[in-house]
Image: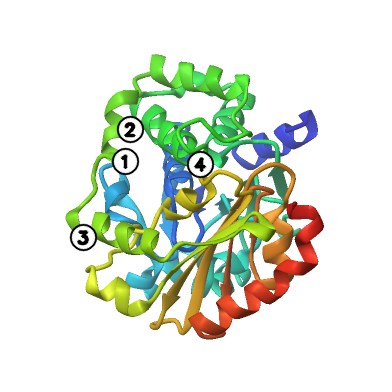
């Protein structure tokens, strides 16, 4: 943030406020960690803060400190609407457009409060009074650390904030292996460890929690993996029936697409997951190098994200979606090969 933006934020926070901190639909570790970490800091500054998520999040994130205090919009609609209506200030974290909050979006759009956006995704919408956007950042959680730093607030850092932000950075960097992980990221991580984040314990709580059903589902996914060598591309499909047969729970497919991307010669990987309840096919896209899955998803799948990691969805059937995807690939052959 520049000095003008810092001054504006300070003016918005110069007296006790009713603040809502909002993450995106289907929140991941970065959304949860960044929102909780920021809320923790703001409470210590004397504000009344409520963290709100559009819907519930995977069980493997429920151990994070203060997740039990999160208001879930889809579970408490009327209460959530009142909270947003009475807010003085709303922070939106880890998403770049209000429609990323699903059914909560029109509630936010009708709010009279000022908005502050903190996010690292490309092309943010212009709805906030303060927009702290940096696509070079590995995670919104790292941005929250720098936000606190810019407000001269590191003295308020405690073990809970350190743990919350560490989770967000670790999960969004794939345990610090993605290209956006910088020397500054590691310096932030060092500071979080010094302030009480137990790195080994956090890693175990996130990654060493596989259920037998999840491992069996992974086996199904890998069995469904298809390689398209002429496009340096691989894809995975999971039908609703396959999910049901393996007692699918929210978060079970997290990271599956990375197995396809890890194959030798693959620069573009995608997983298609059928969701009969919403009547859509959800997808996660990953790439290596300069091939932008953000642009690919924006162009074809009503999605977006980062250059090397994005999400999308299709209203076609699973088989139709895959067929369409294969038909699109020739347009990108030069970029992929």
Q: CA distance from mark 2 to mark 3?
A: 21 Å
- Quarter containing the N terminus: top right
Circle 4 residue: 172
Q: Is residue 65 visible?
A: no
Q: CA distance from mark 1 to mark 4?
A: 12 Å
Q: CA distance from mark 4 to mark 3?
A: 24 Å
**Mark positioned earlier in the residue sequence (2 or 4):** 4
Foreground label between 2 and 3: 3
For mark 1, give the secondary structure: helix
From what the image shows, is residue 236 above or below residue 211? below
From what the image shows, is residue 2 above or below residue 249? above
Foreground label between 3 and 1: 3
Coordinates of residue 250 in the picture (x, y in percent): 33, 62
**Mark positioned earlier in the residue sequence (2 or 3):** 2
Coordinates of residue 307 in the picture (x, y in percent): 69, 48
Circle 2 residue: 203
Work out whether residue 78 or residue 262 is closer to the camera in this orientation and state it. 262
Q: Residue furthest top?
A: 194
Looking at the image, do the residues carrying marks 2 and 1 touch, with CB atoms under 8 Å apart? yes
Circle 1 residue: 206
Work out whether residue 237 or residue 211 is closer to the camera in this orientation and state it. 237
From what the image shows, is residue 271 above or below residue 192? below
């Amino acid at each position: 943030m520049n000095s003008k933006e810092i001054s504006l934020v300070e003016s918005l926070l110069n007296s006790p406020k009713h603040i809502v901190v909002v993450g995106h639909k289907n929140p991941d570790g970065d959304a949860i960690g960044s929102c909780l970490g920021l809320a923790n800091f703001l409470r210590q500054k004397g504000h009344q803060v409520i963290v709100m998520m559009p819907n519930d999040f995977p069980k493997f994130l429920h151990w994070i400190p203060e997740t039990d205090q999160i208001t879930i919009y889809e579970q408490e609609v009327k209460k959530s609407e009142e909270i947003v209506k009475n807010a003085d200030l709303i922070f939106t974290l880890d998403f770049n457009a209000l429609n990323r909050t699903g059914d909560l979006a029109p509630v936010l759009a009708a709010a009279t409060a000022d908005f502050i956006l903190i996010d690292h995704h490309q092309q943010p919408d212009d709805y906030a009074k303060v927009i702290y956007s940096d696509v070079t950042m590995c995670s919104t959680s790292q941005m929250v650390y720098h936000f606190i730093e810019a407000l001269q607030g590191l003295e308020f850092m405690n073990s809970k904030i350190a743990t919350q932000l560490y989770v967000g950075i670790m999960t969004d960097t794939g345990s610090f292996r993605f290209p956006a992980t910088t020397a500054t990221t590691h310096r932030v991580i060092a500071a979080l460890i010094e302030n009480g984040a137990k790195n080994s314990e956090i890693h175990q709580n996130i990654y060493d929690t596989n259920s037998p059903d999840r491992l069996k589902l992974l086996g199904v996914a890998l069995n469904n993996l298809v390689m398209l060598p002429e496009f340096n591309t691989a894809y995975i499909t999971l039908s609703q029936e396959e999910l049901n047969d393996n007692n699918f729970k929210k978060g079970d497919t997290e990271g599956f697409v990375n197995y396809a991307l890890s194959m030798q010669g693959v620069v573009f990987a995608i997983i298609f997951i059928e969701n009969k309840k919403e009547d859509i096919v959800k997808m996660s896209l990953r790439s290596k190098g300069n091939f932008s899955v953000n642009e690919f998803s924006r162009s074809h799948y009503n999605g977006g994200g980062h250059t090397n990691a994005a999400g999308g969805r299709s209203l076609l059937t699973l088989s139709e979606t895959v067929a369409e995807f294969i038909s699109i690939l020739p347009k990108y052959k030069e970029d992929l090969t």
